[in-house]
Amino acid sequence: MSNSAMSNLPQDQVSAGSRNKKKLLTVLIFSSIYMLAEVIGGLLTQSLALLADAAHMLTDVGGLALAFIAIRLGERKANARKTFGYYRAEILAAIANALVLLGISVYVLYEAYQRFKNPPQVQSQTMLVVAAIGLAVNLAGMLILRKGSNQSLNMKGAYFEVLSDMLTSIGVMVAGVIMLTTGWYYADPLISAAIGLLIFPRTWQLLKDATNVLLEGTPTDVNVADLKKNLEEIPGVVMIHDLHVWSLTSGMNAMSVHVVVQSGTAYNQMLKVLANRVVANFNVSHTTFQLEEKDYQENETHL
């Protein structure tokens, strides 16, 4: 006997990304406005650090827009062809953002190497003014997105986009001060290279987390061994097998499991106890149980 139980139906459940979409749209608008100003400033000052920041802002706007579109797509209701809905669109957006950030970092490192060989003279004062405005915009964006980044990989990707730009703005300002006070123009490519390297670790982790969702790996916030042990402690349960736990999107975990029960068990009551135990003790919102008695034989496929 099988049963599906969940605290909220998937098509009606609001994802973490959806709950934060207005904040995301606000940051997208301000980032777009500043991006135009920064591109002009970077070209006028001939600063690689400022152009690197402009490039990050360009990818920022694209990444934020992609994250927003993915959230709207993820809000579409489930149908006969997409029975779990479109939640995975947010994960695809997170992967796209991570790949773009890694690519931009590699490009900045390449440009920094080229400028080490022949550093151009940079208009440091203008560069500082533009970078200071960028720092203010990015700090505001980080504050707006910070809470949502802990709830959704898609929002985390957007947050990292803004974080990388904030680091770049700080680097641009440091390079500007050094060049303004010492005339040492190697500071521009040196700071740019450091920024490129700083972006890598967190972006790589984001890519790994998002890929794990697509591969239907076990969510990091669910301990499968504890889940199995917890269910087997329920009176009337003989054993647990063929247990699967995966994520639809960030914060929306699902599971399916075969439960061997004692003969004469009241199935409806057992299903209620199992579902309540999982929802109360584990971060799983969609549960599917197949109840079996000892003499039932089925090929084992997983845990």
Image: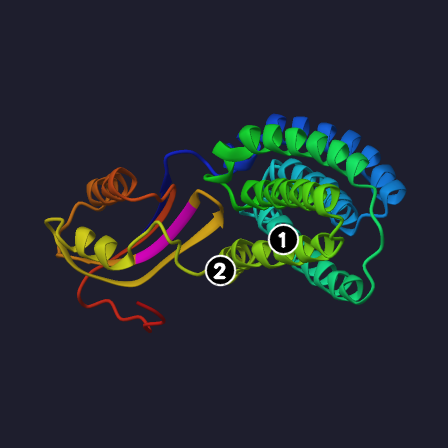
x, y percentage for residue 34? Answer: 77, 32
> Nearest the camera: 13 or 271?
13
* Residue 66 appears in the rendering: no
- Residue at point 56% right, 28% down? 144
Dot 1 crowding, Cα within 10 Å, few <14, some 14–19, many 20+: many
Q: Which residue is mark 2?
A: 212
What amino acid type should be assigned to the residue bearing mark 1?
Ile
- Give the magenta-colored segment's residue range: 253-257
Using residue 47 as the reference point, say whether residue 209 is left or right of it: left
Where is residue 280, by image quadrant?
top left
> Nearest the camera: 249 or 231?
249
What amino acid type should be assigned to the residue bearing mark 2?
Asn
Q: Which residue is mark 1?
A: 195
x, y percentage for residue 148? Answer: 51, 34
Q: Secondary structure at mark 2?
A: helix
In space, the residues marked 1 and 2 are separated at their CA atoms by 27 Å
Q: Secondary structure at mark 1?
A: helix
